Amino acid sequence: MLPAPCRLSLFLLFAIALSIPASAHRRETGFLDRTVTINNHAYKYQVYVPDNWSPNQKWPVILFLHGAVERGSDGLLQTQVGIATAIRKDRSRFRVLVVMPQCPIGHWWPEPPMQRIALEALAASTEEFKGDPKRTYLTGISMGGYGSWYLASTHPGKFAAVVPICGGIVPPANVLEAQPLLARDTYPENTKSYAEVAKRIGKTPVWIFHGDADNAVPVENSRRLYEALKAAGDDVRYTEYPGVGHDEAWERAYVNPELMSWLCSKSL
């Protein structure tokens, strides 16, 4: 029989050996830091992974585009608003992956290089966390609402449903004045522009949200897009909040008890 000290040493080694696989396979959940590299430049983003995540199935994925205030390079500001706030209030409602890229300062989501940042982050998260390409959804607030319209129209058939909040397709005059080159990547203000977007989006289900007291993005933007999609025979819903301003519109939208069930019922 081995001496007692030897038996103790063997027991400890056995216990350590057993603990290594458990630690190695521990699954990260919650808000996770990630980075995507494009043209040798690293862009930070975050992805929310639900507590019950498992690699043994495919997961619905939501791509969330933040507003102008959250632009930057820290990879964090975009997790303080919109859908991230709703997740923190009640995680049980969000049994999905949520990808949250960040638009650099001085840019807008409709710009093709910014769209690429969002799509690269989406692709990386989908691969890492077993996202389902047939159940991939798009939503955004304010500037991200504009981004949602543009991504949906420039990549028709990619998203199973789209939820633009307080957005539009014609940037505000002050934005175009500050970024005149943005006019090359966006639509002019005319009826043809709205009809073109509706045609491009096609049968992709869309649920629009806006407050009629919005002082930052005119509610008329969403009204005109709703009418254009409806006239084209597209699958569209519109919720307009009376007396509600800019920020409060998305706060209400993301806690809407019907939103997540509606969204996750859609599939390509």
Image: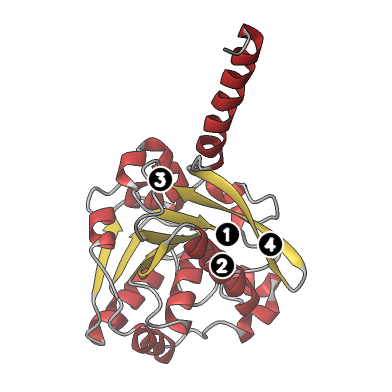
Asked if labels 4 and 3 touch by Cβ distance under 8 angstroms, the answer is no
What amino acid is found at the position of numbered circle 2 in the picture?
Answer: Ala
Asked if labels 1 and 3 touch by Cβ distance under 8 angstroms, the answer is no
Asked if labels 1 and 2 touch by Cβ distance under 8 angstroms, the answer is yes
What amino acid is found at the position of numbered circle 1 in the picture?
Answer: Pro
Q: Which residue position is annotated with label 2?
A: 118
Give the number of the mark in front: 3 or 1.
3
Give the number of the mark in front: 3 or 4.
3
Using the image, tell me which numbered label, if any, was put on residue 104: 4
Crowding at mark 3 (Cα within 10 Å: few <14, some 14-19, many 20+): many
Give the number of the mark in front: 2 or 3.
3
68 and 244: which is toward the camera: 68
- Label 2: element kind: helix
Asked if labels 1 and 4 touch by Cβ distance under 8 angstroms, the answer is no
58 and 178: which is toward the camera: 58
Measure the C-alpha gap from mark 2 to mark 1.
6 Å
- Label 4: element kind: loop
- Label 1: element kind: loop
Crowding at mark 4 (Cα within 10 Å: few <14, some 14-19, many 20+): some
What amino acid is found at the position of numbered circle 3 in the picture?
Answer: Pro
x and y percent of residue 123 in the render?
52, 68
Which residue is rendered at x = 31% and y = 78% of the image?
A: 204
| Mark 3 / mark 4, whichever is N-terminal | 3
Q: Residue furthest top?
A: 4
Measure the C-alpha gap from mark 4 to mark 1.
10 Å
Which residue is rendered at x = 61% and y = 79% of the image?
A: 112
| Mark 4 / mark 2, whichever is N-terminal | 4
Q: Is residue 45 visible?
A: yes
Using the image, tell me which numbered label, if any, was put on residue 101: 1
| Mark 2 / mark 1, whichever is N-terminal | 1
What amino acid is found at the position of numbered circle 4 in the picture?
Answer: Pro
